[in-house]
Structure formats: structure tokens, C-alpha cells
Image: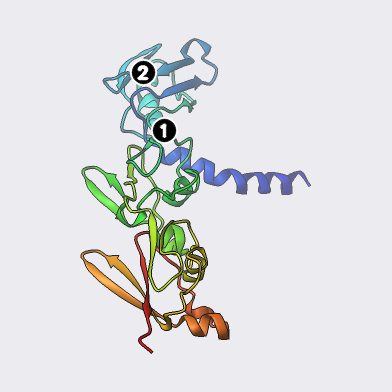
């Protein structure tokens, strides 16, 4: 029974162990060094702005930029000058280097401390409402270049293959969506601008605009959408939607869409 419990525990601990081995130490991180049987060498140290640490018996050893196993190997080599075959363990007590920054007018600016590696989707899901953010123009900035752009497919369409693992120091830029309305114009009872919300459809917008006027041609409705520098026209057969229940005609809207209901001349 104990063996089974140990195996299960190791399975759950394995990802955390891998993350710890993969973690790159940075300035300001706090480490503990424990040398078995040598209490006078045990210490808790902070990585200095120059990237180095000092401890009893070891002066100025480079820590920043190395993983915990790499630093352990260096410390073992240094301490072996003092004691034979030292056995030591290094633990990360506090991480201030593994931060991800969220900026842009689309969301509140935030700084995420990552105790373990995470992905873009997980951070997006923790931001709350993204109604004001233009996800089509959002991107992840790393080491002077964009490594991921346009979050629409990932966040709204479930295209999870586009998810990326974030790295310490990444900046997620979330610009504001300047046009947050959908416009219903033409042959409707109450032409109006409607505040866009996720999941808004043609039928929702038409109902808010008081349905069609008596002069409307229900088969002459079009959605005009701006895609990049071009205008895209999406025809909608609203008669089939309203009278036949053809849900394929109930198009999902995007902020900035214009729904134009044309008048009938007969």
C-alpha cells in the first residue's frame, strides 16, 4: 500500500520537479543551500543585482542565468575544496524573476508572479472580462520581438494548438477595442448602436432594434464587417431564421459590425 501511495505521489510531483529543474535563476531570487552534515555551511541567500551569491566558504559565485541543478554542480565543485564529497541541496524559496507583464488599454495592467510555468491561455482566463480588449491585435512580446499575435482563435474558438508557454519577462499587450458597438441601421423600427458583448448574434441585435419596419425586405439584410483594411459583406436570410428556424443564419457578431436592413420597393 505504501508503495502505491509513493508512486502516486511521485506522479503528481514529477511536473513540479521538472519545472524546478527548468527554472532559470534571476536577480532578487532567494535560495536556500543545505549541506548535509555541515550546519555551518547552510545558508539562505539572495541573488544580488550583479547576479552572484555568497555563502560560508564560497565567495561570489555566478547564480543568475543558471538552473538550480547547474548551480548545484558549481557549488559542489567549490565546496569540495573544503570537505570531501559534499552532498548538498538547493531550493528556491522566493522567485521575483519569473514575472509576466500585462499591459495595454484593453485590461487593467498587471504583473503576474509565476511560481511555476504557465501558458498564455491560463493568464488570459484569469484577467476577467476581455470585452474592452481587441484580441485580434493583441500579442506576446519577448526578447525584442512578437512571438504570438491574435488571440481570437485561441480564446474564443478553442484553437488550443495556438497556446504557448510563457517565459519570465514576457509582456502581453492587450490593446483597447476602440469601437465596442454593433450598429443596426436601415429598415428597422429603432436604428441604434448596441454595446457589443460576447455571443451577440444578428437576432439579438435585431430584437434590440425593435425588429424590422413594415418596409423591410427580410431577405436583403447584410452584415458589413471590417477585416484588416477590407470590408467584408455577410448576407443573412433573416426570413429563413425567423420563420424556418435556420440557425445558420444567426451569425455571431463582432464589435464594429454594421447590420444593414434594406427596404423593399414593392
Above or below — where is 120 with respect to 212?
Answer: above
Where's residue 97, x and y in %?
37, 30
Res 183 → quadrant: bottom left
Residue 164 in the image: state x and y as whole percent.
Answer: 39, 53
Q: Quadrant of the C terminus?
A: bottom left
Q: CA distance from mark 2 to mark 1?
A: 21 Å
Give the camera-side residue of 145 and 186.
186
- Rate crowding at label 2 as few (under 14), some (14 to 19) or many (20 or more) other CA atoms within 10 Å: few
Secondary structure under the numbered disc 1 in the rendered image:
helix
Query: Given this view, does label 2 or label 1 mark the residue nearer the observer?
Result: 1
Residue 10 at x, y percent in the picture: 62, 45
* Label 1 Cα neighbours within 10 Å, binned few <14 / some 14-19 / many ≥20: many
| Colouring used for the render | rainbow
Q: Residue at x 41, y 41 (%)?
A: 22
Say which of 165 and 139 sits in front: 139
Q: Give the secondary structure at mark 2.
A: loop
Q: Is residue 62 above or below residue 196?
A: above
Residue 176 placed where, x, y %?
33, 46
Return the residue nearer the eye: 118 or 175.
175
Left or right, 131 with respect to 140, comes to right
Q: Residue at x 38, y 12 (%)?
A: 57
Residue at horizontal 36%, vertical 64%? 257
The residue to which callout 2 is attached is: 81
Q: Residue furthest right?
A: 1
Q: Earlier in the sequence, mark 2 or mark 1?
A: 1
Above or below residue 167? Residue 188 is below
Please identify the residue farthest to the bottom as the structure is shown: 266
Q: Which residue is mark 1?
A: 68
Amino acid at each position: 500500500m505504501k508503495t502505491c501511495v509513493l508512486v502516486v505521489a511521485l506522479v503528481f510531483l514529477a511536473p513540479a520537479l521538472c519545472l524546478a529543474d527548468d527554472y532559470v535563476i534571476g536577480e532578487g531570487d532567494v535560495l536556500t543551500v543545505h549541506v548535509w552534515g555541515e550546519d555551518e555551511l547552510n545558508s539562505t541567500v539572495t541573488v544580488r543585482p550583479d547576479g552572484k551569491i555568497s555563502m560560508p566558504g564560497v565567495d561570489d559565485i555566478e547564480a543568475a542565468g543558471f538552473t538550480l541543478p547547474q548551480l548545484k554542480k558549481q557549488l559542489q565543485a567549490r565546496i569540495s575544496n573544503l570537505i570531501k564529497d559534499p552532498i548538498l541541496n538547493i531550493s528556491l524559496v522566493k522567485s521575483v524573476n519569473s514575472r509576466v507583464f500585462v499591459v495595454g488599454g484593453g485590461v487593467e495592467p498587471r504583473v503576474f508572479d509565476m511560481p511555476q510555468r504557465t501558458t498564455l491561455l491560463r493568464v488570459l482566463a484569469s484577467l476577467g472580462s476581455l470585452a474592452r480588449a481587441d484580441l485580434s491585435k493583441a500579442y506576446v512580446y519577448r526578447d525584442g520581438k512578437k512571438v504570438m499575435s491574435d488571440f481570437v482563435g485561441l480564446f474564443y474558438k478553442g484553437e488550443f494548438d495556438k497556446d504557448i508557454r510563457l517565459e519570465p519577462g514576457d509582456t502581453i499587450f492587450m490593446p483597447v477595442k476602440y469601437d465596442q458597438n454593433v450598429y443596426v441601421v436601415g429598415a428597422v423600427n429603432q436604428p441604434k448602436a448596441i454595446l457589443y458583448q460576447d455571443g451577440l448574434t444578428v437576432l439579438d441585435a435585431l430584437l434590440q432594434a425593435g425588429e424590422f419596419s413594415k418596409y423591410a425586405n427580410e431577405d436583403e439584410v447584410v452584415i458589413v464587417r471590417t477585416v484588416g483594411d477590407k470590408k467584408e459583406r455577410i448576407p443573412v436570410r433573416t426570413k429563413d431564421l425567423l420563420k424556418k428556424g435556420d440557425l445558420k443564419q444567426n451569425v455571431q457578431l463582432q464589435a464594429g459590425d454594421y447590420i444593414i436592413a434594406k427596404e423593399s420597393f414593392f
